[in-house]
Amino acid sequence: MAPTPKQITEFMHAAEDEAQMAGIIGEVPIGAVVVHDGKIVGRGHNLREHSQNGTHHAEMMAIEEACLVLHTWRLEECDLYVTLEPCPMCAGAMINSRVRTCYWGAADPKAGAAGTLVDLLTDTRFNHQVGSVGGVDADISAKMLQDFFRGIRAKRKAAKKQKQAAAAASTTTVVADPAVAHAEAEHEEPEITGLAVLKYAAKLEAKQKQADQDAKAANK
Ligand SMILES: [Zn+2]
Protein backbone atom coordinates (compact mmCIF):
# COMPACT_ATOMS: atom_id res chain seq x y z
CA MET A 1 0.00 0.00 0.00
CA ALA A 2 1.29 3.45 -0.83
CA PRO A 3 2.11 5.62 2.19
CA THR A 4 -0.16 8.46 3.25
CA PRO A 5 1.20 12.04 3.10
CA LYS A 6 1.48 11.92 6.90
CA GLN A 7 3.59 8.74 6.71
CA ILE A 8 5.81 10.24 4.03
CA THR A 9 6.53 13.20 6.31
CA GLU A 10 7.12 10.93 9.29
CA PHE A 11 9.58 8.65 7.45
CA MET A 12 11.42 11.57 5.90
CA HIS A 13 11.84 12.95 9.42
CA ALA A 14 13.42 9.63 10.42
CA ALA A 15 15.82 9.95 7.48
CA GLU A 16 16.61 13.50 8.60
CA ASP A 17 17.42 12.17 12.10
CA GLU A 18 19.89 9.79 10.48
CA ALA A 19 21.40 12.67 8.51
CA GLN A 20 21.81 14.62 11.72
CA MET A 21 23.68 11.70 13.29
CA ALA A 22 26.09 11.71 10.35
CA GLY A 23 26.63 15.44 10.81
CA ILE A 24 27.36 15.02 14.52
CA ILE A 25 30.23 12.63 13.81
CA GLY A 26 31.61 14.86 11.07
CA GLU A 27 30.20 13.04 8.04
CA VAL A 28 28.30 14.90 5.32
CA PRO A 29 24.73 14.84 6.74
CA ILE A 30 22.78 12.46 4.52
CA GLY A 31 20.38 9.90 6.00
CA ALA A 32 18.06 7.18 4.74
CA VAL A 33 15.48 4.70 5.97
CA VAL A 34 13.85 1.70 4.33
CA VAL A 35 10.19 1.13 5.17
CA HIS A 36 8.25 -2.13 4.88
CA ASP A 37 4.59 -2.42 5.77
CA GLY A 38 4.57 0.95 7.53
CA LYS A 39 7.59 0.04 9.66
CA ILE A 40 11.23 1.14 9.40
CA VAL A 41 13.36 -1.95 8.72
CA GLY A 42 16.61 -0.27 7.78
CA ARG A 43 18.37 2.92 8.80
CA GLY A 44 21.58 4.37 7.54
CA HIS A 45 23.67 7.44 7.34
CA ASN A 46 26.72 8.41 5.40
CA LEU A 47 29.85 6.77 6.90
CA ARG A 48 32.31 7.30 4.08
CA GLU A 49 34.97 9.10 6.13
CA HIS A 50 34.90 6.83 9.17
CA SER A 51 34.97 3.61 7.19
CA GLN A 52 37.10 5.09 4.38
CA ASN A 53 34.81 3.33 1.97
CA GLY A 54 33.23 5.17 -0.94
CA THR A 55 30.27 2.80 -1.04
CA HIS A 56 29.13 3.59 2.49
CA HIS A 57 26.37 6.00 1.48
CA ALA A 58 23.23 6.34 3.62
CA GLU A 59 21.06 4.39 1.14
CA MET A 60 23.53 1.49 0.93
CA MET A 61 23.64 1.19 4.73
CA ALA A 62 19.85 1.31 5.02
CA ILE A 63 19.40 -1.30 2.25
CA GLU A 64 21.97 -3.58 3.89
CA GLU A 65 20.15 -3.42 7.20
CA ALA A 66 16.73 -3.96 5.58
CA CYS A 67 18.01 -7.10 3.81
CA LEU A 68 19.35 -8.44 7.12
CA VAL A 69 16.06 -7.76 8.87
CA LEU A 70 13.79 -9.12 6.12
CA HIS A 71 16.13 -12.01 5.16
CA THR A 72 15.82 -11.20 1.49
CA TRP A 73 17.52 -9.12 -1.17
CA ARG A 74 14.14 -8.42 -2.77
CA LEU A 75 12.77 -5.21 -1.32
CA GLU A 76 9.78 -5.20 -3.65
CA GLU A 77 7.37 -3.99 -1.01
CA CYS A 78 9.78 -1.50 0.48
CA ASP A 79 10.11 2.24 0.01
CA LEU A 80 13.33 4.13 0.61
CA TYR A 81 13.45 7.65 2.04
CA VAL A 82 16.64 9.63 1.63
CA THR A 83 17.41 13.26 2.38
CA LEU A 84 19.42 13.86 -0.82
CA GLU A 85 18.77 12.77 -4.39
CA PRO A 86 20.46 9.38 -4.87
CA CYS A 87 23.74 9.06 -6.76
CA PRO A 88 24.17 6.52 -9.62
CA MET A 89 25.50 3.85 -7.23
CA CYS A 90 22.56 4.13 -4.83
CA ALA A 91 20.01 4.38 -7.62
CA GLY A 92 21.59 1.21 -9.04
CA ALA A 93 21.37 -0.49 -5.64
CA MET A 94 17.68 0.41 -5.45
CA ILE A 95 17.05 -1.04 -8.93
CA ASN A 96 18.95 -4.21 -8.03
CA SER A 97 17.13 -4.50 -4.70
CA ARG A 98 13.78 -3.98 -6.46
CA VAL A 99 12.82 -1.09 -4.21
CA ARG A 100 9.25 0.07 -4.90
CA THR A 101 9.49 3.85 -4.49
CA CYS A 102 12.24 6.27 -3.53
CA TYR A 103 11.22 9.46 -1.73
CA TRP A 104 14.11 11.89 -1.80
CA GLY A 105 14.74 15.39 -0.45
CA ALA A 106 17.05 17.96 -1.99
CA ALA A 107 18.26 17.67 -5.58
CA ASP A 108 21.97 16.98 -6.05
CA PRO A 109 23.43 19.00 -8.93
CA LYS A 110 26.74 17.08 -8.73
CA ALA A 111 25.61 13.46 -8.53
CA GLY A 112 21.80 13.30 -8.78
CA ALA A 113 20.69 10.18 -10.65
CA ALA A 114 16.96 10.62 -10.11
CA GLY A 115 16.45 13.32 -12.71
CA THR A 116 19.07 16.00 -12.13
CA LEU A 117 21.99 14.56 -14.14
CA VAL A 118 20.38 11.32 -15.28
CA ASP A 119 17.25 9.47 -14.29
CA LEU A 120 18.16 5.88 -13.59
CA LEU A 121 15.25 5.06 -11.28
CA THR A 122 12.49 5.29 -13.88
CA ASP A 123 14.49 4.30 -16.99
CA THR A 124 12.38 1.63 -18.66
CA ARG A 125 15.42 0.03 -20.33
CA PHE A 126 16.27 -1.54 -16.94
CA ASN A 127 14.49 -4.67 -15.75
CA HIS A 128 13.00 -2.81 -12.77
CA GLN A 129 11.76 0.73 -12.28
CA VAL A 130 11.75 2.48 -8.95
CA GLY A 131 9.03 5.06 -8.33
CA SER A 132 10.64 8.45 -7.81
CA VAL A 133 9.19 11.25 -5.69
CA GLY A 134 11.63 14.12 -5.26
CA GLY A 135 11.68 17.33 -3.26
CA VAL A 136 10.21 15.86 -0.05
CA ASP A 137 11.21 18.23 2.79
CA ALA A 138 13.92 19.45 0.41
CA ASP A 139 14.51 22.76 2.20
CA ILE A 140 15.34 20.98 5.47
CA SER A 141 17.90 18.59 3.95
CA ALA A 142 19.42 21.40 1.90
CA LYS A 143 19.78 23.56 5.00
CA MET A 144 21.44 20.72 6.92
CA LEU A 145 24.01 20.36 4.14
CA GLN A 146 24.55 24.12 3.87
CA ASP A 147 25.05 24.45 7.65
CA PHE A 148 27.46 21.54 7.65
CA PHE A 149 29.68 22.94 4.92
CA ARG A 150 29.46 26.42 6.39
CA GLY A 151 30.69 24.95 9.69
CA ILE A 152 33.59 23.20 7.97
CA ARG A 153 34.63 26.40 6.20
CA ALA A 154 34.50 28.31 9.49
CA LYS A 155 36.60 25.63 11.22
CA ARG A 156 39.16 25.71 8.42
CA LYS A 157 39.34 29.47 8.63
CA ALA A 158 39.81 29.37 12.41
CA ALA A 159 42.52 26.69 12.11
CA LYS A 160 44.35 28.78 9.53
CA LYS A 161 44.18 31.82 11.79
CA GLN A 162 45.46 29.79 14.73
CA LYS A 163 48.35 28.47 12.64
CA GLN A 164 49.27 31.97 11.56
CA ALA A 165 49.10 33.18 15.16
CA ALA A 166 51.25 30.25 16.31
CA ALA A 167 53.80 30.96 13.60
CA ALA A 168 53.93 34.60 14.64
CA ALA A 169 54.26 33.60 18.30
CA SER A 170 57.05 31.09 17.66
CA THR A 171 59.22 33.79 16.13
CA THR A 172 58.99 35.64 19.43
CA THR A 173 59.42 34.04 22.84
CA VAL A 174 56.28 31.86 23.21
CA VAL A 175 56.69 28.37 21.81
CA ALA A 176 53.61 26.10 21.58
CA ASP A 177 54.19 22.74 23.19
CA PRO A 178 54.01 20.19 20.35
CA ALA A 179 53.54 17.33 22.83
CA VAL A 180 50.34 18.90 24.16
CA ALA A 181 49.00 19.57 20.67
CA HIS A 182 49.79 15.99 19.67
CA ALA A 183 48.13 14.55 22.78
CA GLU A 184 45.02 16.62 22.16
CA ALA A 185 44.80 15.52 18.54
CA GLU A 186 45.40 11.87 19.50
CA HIS A 187 42.73 12.09 22.12
CA GLU A 188 40.00 13.51 20.00
CA GLU A 189 40.07 11.86 16.58
CA PRO A 190 40.47 8.12 17.23
CA GLU A 191 37.86 8.22 19.99
CA ILE A 192 35.20 9.67 17.68
CA THR A 193 36.14 7.29 14.87
CA GLY A 194 36.03 4.22 17.12
CA LEU A 195 32.70 5.22 18.59
CA ALA A 196 31.00 5.65 15.23
CA VAL A 197 32.25 2.36 13.87
CA LEU A 198 31.36 0.51 17.07
CA LYS A 199 27.95 2.13 17.07
CA TYR A 200 27.37 0.97 13.55
CA ALA A 201 28.53 -2.56 14.31
CA ALA A 202 26.33 -2.70 17.43
CA LYS A 203 23.36 -1.45 15.47
CA LEU A 204 23.76 -4.16 12.83
CA GLU A 205 24.26 -6.79 15.53
CA ALA A 206 21.11 -5.73 17.38
CA LYS A 207 19.08 -5.79 14.17
CA GLN A 208 20.42 -9.24 13.31
CA LYS A 209 19.55 -10.50 16.80
CA GLN A 210 16.05 -9.10 16.50
CA ALA A 211 15.65 -10.65 13.06
CA ASP A 212 16.80 -14.03 14.40
CA GLN A 213 14.36 -13.77 17.29
CA ASP A 214 11.54 -12.85 14.94
CA ALA A 215 12.40 -15.78 12.69
CA LYS A 216 12.43 -18.11 15.72
CA ALA A 217 9.10 -16.74 16.94
CA ALA A 218 7.60 -17.18 13.48
CA ASN A 219 8.75 -20.82 13.39
CA LYS A 220 7.14 -21.67 16.73
ZN1 LIG B 1 24.85 7.31 -3.14
Image (cartoon, helix red, strand yellow):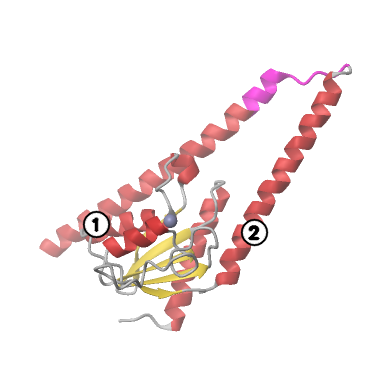
Q: Is residue 182 magenta?
A: yes
Please name whichever residue, 59 or 24, is drawn nearer the observer in this view of the structure.
59
Q: Ligand 1 is found in which quarter of the picture?
A: bottom left
Residue drawn at (49%, 58%) of the image: 111
Toward which corner of the image does residue 132 lie, by quadrant? Answer: bottom left
- Assess disc 1: are there few (<14), some (14-19) or many (≥20) residues with their C-alpha within 10 Å of its C-alpha: some
Q: Which kind of residue does numbered mark 1 sit on?
A: Ala
Which quadrant would the N terminus be assigned to in this image?
A: bottom left
State whether residue 50 is above or below residue 219: above
Disc 2 on helix, strand or loop? helix
Residue 176 as seen in the image, left or right of residue 80: right
Q: Is residue 170 visible?
A: yes
Decide which of 182, 212 is in the foreground and name it: 182
Q: How far apart are labels 1 and 2 at the CA level? A: 37 Å
Residue at the spot of label 1: 211
Mark 2 sits on what residue?
146
Side of 202 relative to 141 (left or right)? left
* Vertical comparison of 76 with 179: above or below: below
State the image coordinates of residue 110 (x, y, percent, origin top left): 53, 58
Could you tell me how many numbered marks the image carries?
2
Q: Residue furthest front?
A: 125
Task: Please report the bounds of the magenta region as a residue range.
Answer: 173-184
Question: Which one is closest to the eye, mark 1 or mark 2?
Answer: 2
Q: With 179 as the anchor, is 51 left or right in this view?
A: left
